[in-house]
Amino acid sequence: MADLAHARAAFQGRSVVSADDFSKDDIIALLDAARQYDRFQDDGPTWAGIEPSLQGRVLGVLFFEPSTRTRLSFESAMLRLGGSVLGFADANISSFSKGETLVDTIRVVEGYCDAVVLRHPREGAARLAAEVASVPILNGGDGSNQHPTQTFLDLYTIRQAAGTLDGLKVGFMGDLRYGRTVHSLATALLHFDVNLKFIGPENLSLPPDLRDHLVAQDRLDAEVESLADAGDLDVLYVTRIQQERFPDPMDYQRVRNAYRVDRESLAPFGPDLKVLHPLPRVNEVATEVDDLPGALYFQQSRNGVTVRMALLDLILGAQGGGESA
Ligand code: CP
């Protein structure tokens, strides 16, 4: 297990804007630190014994786009650690609707809390916020760009299920162009000895800068349009086609049902295939897949609490928190 002191040094007081900002050692240290918060058992979570290390600390949640998991798992994590949460229920009833800029909003809200989770439709919004804020900014998703805390819980889930992050063949399927979870996770996986494959329609292929980065590192192992052409896989990371990002609604109509997995299409990969999805799903994973042992997406969403507890404690806590003696 990596040194908790390394984890605290890497994260304390720091913004989380992009997965690229963290080294392999930083990420491993975070995933190791998160193990102590892994309380989900078959009969439900048991939170007894967790030290309320963030008592008196306040987390601001500024969501300018819809969310279920990111917002609620951050809120749950903060509350489990004894802290408090504030935020508006809907950005349209904040002063954003009167024309207040993001920079002014951040400059105001930083006076009310100790850290801010920000979700915003504009790429680069989290970086801009982190540049002006005096408190850590946690990127909860900025447009099609990045979703780094999702990446941390994705890595945690893969390692939990496979026992390792090395030696795996990982396939990304669906919206490779607009899917920020794909961009974050693929970048972070470059730290590990993995084989990266991308499955999607040509008009939703990887953004050129990410594709060039993967090619330059000789890590683009396959780009195919059909899952059947992907070859062996240990992990299949399915994503929703991001309807809200399409400039032309007709382009969405053309691909909306093209990428869907069911038991039949997954059968060739064998029973050990791990299926992840950041959720929400629309129709790209048939519900009949949910009962397969490798269907990890609900466990993945629960791990959002586990990993975000560790992250918040490392960023905001004084000593490392965790279980009381
Ligand atoms: N995975 C994820 O970001 O889900 P939400 O959009 O519900 O937060």
Image (cartoon, rainbow, N blue to C red):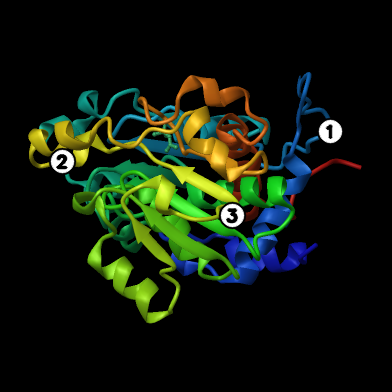
Which residue is the site of mark 3? 315
Q: Position of residue 169 (x, y in %)?
A: 56, 59
**Numbered label attached to residue 49:** 1
Please name the amino acid that badge 2 sits on: Phe
Marks 2/3: CA–CA distance: 35 Å
Please name the amino acid that badge 1 sits on: Gly
Which of the 4 image quarters holds residue 57?
A: top right
Q: Residue, x 60% and y 35% (percent of image)?
A: 296
Q: Position of residue 247 (x, y in %)?
A: 10, 42
Is there any visible trace of residue 19 in the rendered image?
no
**Sequence-wise first label, 2 or 1:** 1
Q: Are marks 2 and 3 in contact (CB under 8 Å)?
A: no
Question: Of circles 2 and 3, which is in front?
Answer: 2
168 versus 103 height, above or below: below
Q: Is residue 68 left or right of residue 252?
A: right
Quadrant location, the N terminus: bottom right
93 versus 172 height, above or below: above
Q: Residue, x 15% and y 41% (percent of image)?
A: 246
Ligand 1 shows up in the quarter that is: top left
**Sequence-wise first label, 1 or 3:** 1
Marks 1/3: CA–CA distance: 21 Å
| Crowd band around label 2 with a 10 angstrom C-alpha radius: few (<14), some (14–19), many (20+) | few
**Numbered label attached to residue 246:** 2
**Sequence-wise first label, 2 or 3:** 2
State the SS at label 2.
loop
Please name the amino acid that badge 3 sits on: Ile
Viewer-closest of 123 and 195: 195
Q: Position of residue 74 (x, y in %)?
A: 53, 36
Q: Residue, x 32% and y 29% (percent of image)?
A: 66
133 versus 246 height, above or below: below
